Amino acid sequence: MIALLLRDLRLAVRAGGGFGLGLAFFLIVVVLVPFGVGPDTALLSAIAPGIFWVASLLAALLSLDRIFALDFEDGSLTLLATSPLPFEGAALMKALAHWITTGLPLTVAAPALGFLLNLAPEAYVYLLLSLLLGTPALSMIGTFGAGLTVGLRRGGLLLSLLVLPLYVPTLIFGAEAVRRGADGLDPTGALMLLAGITVGGFALLPFATAAVLRINLR
Amino acid sequence: MSIWEYANPKKFMGWTGPVLTWTFILGGVSLAVGLVWGFFFTPDDFRQGSTVKIIYLHVPAALMAINAWIMMLVASLIWVVRRHHVSALAARAAAPVGMTMTLIALFTGAIWGQPMWGTYWAWDPRLTSFLILFLFYLGYIALWEAIEDPDTAADLTAVLCMVGSVFAILSRYAVLFWSQGLHQGASVMRAGAVAGDTQERVSNVFAVPLFISIAGFVLLFVALVLLRTRTEIRARRMRALEARMRRA
């Protein structure tokens, strides 16, 4: 399983763009929002938590269809399905590799972008914490969506239609945690629920993902 | 003779024919009675005036929007466990009906909200979760349409329905966390009212036509789902026949 994870990471790095693309997209969304809503710093600091979370959602979405598409085309997914390795484990590793290539860089970079949106100083630590706890859930849910649409010729648009409603709870809890942190309220409740979604997702969704992949490989 | 025999497509076509006619007739009658009674023969509410009458559309539609999803979930489970094709087709047939119910609930709510709350839309937990439910319906229908092989489509949408149900419930409670709402809580089936406390109950003047209207919506939903399932079965038979003719 570790070998599979390392293989996916190596592919992401060497294929070019895999690693930095999500991050660059995240940066562009965060930079574009002030152009859209105007340079009012009070307004920007009020909406900053939401923007960071919506931007990470979109950045995660951007690279989802690459999770299984290449492996599906060249047949390695079939090999994985028939290998002695539990297929659920393979699905889990795919999600983890996706998180390391998109979620983790976002988490590290987001606080550095906080000053662009005039984020309240108290909120930085909660932004970091909420993204750290929440982005794995985005990757896992997205992996399930990617598994659903892997057999489709033009699955990209459908993938976003399927996955985005599933992202709603994560988005609510994540943005709420940062907002409470910024307002000086206690964000532990939201953070714990966020962690709950991630843990629950990683516990159950690999089974659903493996099931839909088996159906698609049939 | 077990209940599953009724799921045999041939048997299903046999018994649903007469049932369909009767549910359509009964549903149409109770809808007409419930709505006409509700709209023209109930007094105006002393604070809301005549706008209160939209509950005869709003409440049944909202109820059926949720029940349709639950029905799809049960049908998907039956398909996954017992692999009755009719079950998968019924789940598929229910989705557009449920989506329409969601839309009716959202629209009638907006029409009522404008004079009462002073706005067509508020980011209230109940309103928001219905909007999310609408998105789930949209995704479910889109997945059915996108996949060509019928069995693969049935399997994948069944899994989506199950995972989606979990997330729909999560979203329902997540939006509570996020905003406290304007929408009133459950009024018709409140604990006090079920226990028989008349002070807690919606007055019979309003409740009786409401229940008739709800019955009409339920029957209409059953009739539409049966009709759509029957159409789908016929379409499949046609395709099978065409395939056989091409081979011959």
Image (tube, coloured by chain):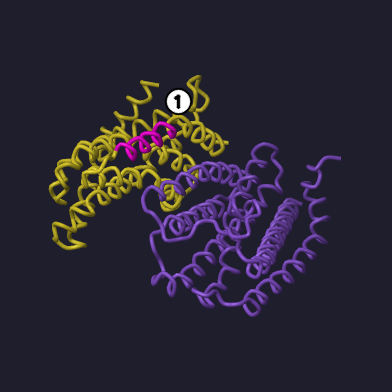
Chain colours: A yellow, B purple
Q: Is disc 1 placed on a helix, strand or loop?
A: helix
Q: Is residue B183 magenta?
A: no
Where residue A104 sits: x, y (%)?
A: 26, 34
Residue ID for mark 1? A89
**Left or right relative to B177: residue B144:** right
Q: Nearer the viewer, residue B230 or B3?
A: B3
Q: Nearer the viewer, residue B133 or B248?
A: B133
Q: Amino acid at mark 1?
A: Gly
Magenta segment boundaries in residue numbering:
A188-201
Relative to A129, is A160 above or below?
A: below
Q: Nearer the viewer, residue A72 or A94?
A: A94
Q: Is residue A196 magenta?
A: yes
The overriding secondary structure of the stretch rendered in magenta is: helix
- Residue at x 48%, y 60% (from the top left corner): B184
Pointer 1 local density, CA inside 10 Å: few below 14, some 14–19, many at least 20: some
Q: Report in which chain the residue with disc 1 lies.
A: A
**Left or right relative to B171: residue A54:** left
Relative to A109, is B223 above or below?
A: below
- Residue at x 47%, y 34% (from the top left corner): A205
Quadrant assignment for the N terminus of chain B: top right
Where residue B159 sits: x, y (%)?
A: 56, 41
Residue B116 is drawn in which quadrant? bottom left
